[in-house]
Image (cartoon, rainbow, N blue to C red):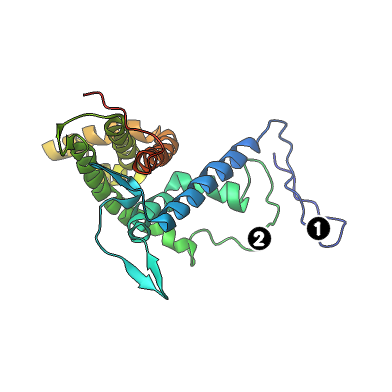
Amino acid sequence: MAVRTAQSKEAGRAPLPLTSRLDKWWIKPVLTVIVLGGFGLYSLWRAFENQFFEFGPYLTPFYSPEVPLEWELAGWKISPAFYILVFPLSFRLTCYYYRLAYYRAFFLDPPACAVSEPFPRKRYTGERRFPLILQNLHRFAFYAAAIFIVILSYDAIKAFFWEDGFHMGLGTLILIGNVLLLALYTFSCHSFSHLIGGRLDCYSCSLVSKTRHGIWKQVSFLNSRHSLYAWASLISVMVTDIYIRSVASGVIQDFRFF
């Protein structure tokens, strides 16, 4: 059971979260801050860098699809990565699992189960008011994420075709692995589960409903591992970008299998 936050005796000092838990509950939110925060900073840096995103047929997911469009704002060139990343980023930001993770890690709301909030609110409105009401756009962000799976699948296939023929390099395998993990994360989503099996009163009344029920069970199996796919795909996107940037900048050479 959580213990109510005690009022600090020292003026100006914020109360600390209190709990009767004896385990190291704080490790998970700290790791979330490190990984999610690190990914966010790295993504921002790469978007501003606006180079080393392509090598042969390899194209980093941060700059895919390759849009020949650059805007200028007050003399600054706006990288295409900014208006490409907004779509997959909106899917992750509104994801039910990620909301749980970053609400706890960044906003301490609450830091963990049975741990009191350091800054208790006078009134709780959930996600019914701005800006949190925008979290309800998750089901629409899913459609954009699904389109990006198609785009990244094309990039993975294209990675076999070089100017001098058909080849497979290490980057090819990384791109394939990345899109597979992203697909697992995207299609294990709660919104996709509802899209497949929702709004049905009877699963056995017709062939279509039986088919949807069968697909829904498979999606539900994936959904039980949604958090695992969320972290694995996040890491795979960064690894893919780091590898392509490294070979494009000449830091390393792409290893070719054939």
Say which quadrant the N terminus sits in: top right
Q: Which mark is residue 132?
A: none
Badge 1 marks a residue whose secondary structure is loop
Q: Could you tell me how far apart the alpha carbons at marks 2 and 1 are, in whole angstroms?
A: 17 Å
Q: Quadrant of residue 28?
A: top right
Q: Is residue 88 visible?
A: yes
Q: Residue at x 19, y 34 (%)?
A: 160
Q: Quadrant of residue 79?
A: bottom left
Report the amino acid beneath label 2. Arg
Q: Are marks 2 and 1 in contact (CB under 8 Å)?
A: no
Say which quadrant the C terminus sits in: top left
Residue 158: x and y in percent read 19, 40
Mark 1 residue crowding within 10 angstroms, few (<14) / some (14–19) / many (20+): few
- In this view, which residue lies farthest toward the right? 9
**Front in this rendered view, residue 143 or 7:** 143
Report the amino acid beneath label 1. Arg
- In this view, which residue lies farthest toward the front? 250
Q: On the rendered structure, is 154 left or right of 234?
A: left
Residue 187 position (above or below residue 132)? above
Q: Residue at x 62, y 63 (%)?
A: 123
Q: Quadrant of residue 245?
A: top left
Residue 97: x and y in percent read 46, 44
Q: On the rendered structure, is 124 left or right of 141?
A: right
Mark 2 residue crowding within 10 angstroms, few (<14) / some (14–19) / many (20+): few
Tell me the residue that label 2 is attached to.
121
Tell me the residue that label 1 is attached to.
13
Residue 145: x and y in percent read 30, 49
Q: On the rendered structure, is 7 left or right of 49?
A: right
Badge 2 marks a residue whose secondary structure is loop
Which-is-in-front pick, marks 2 and 1? 1
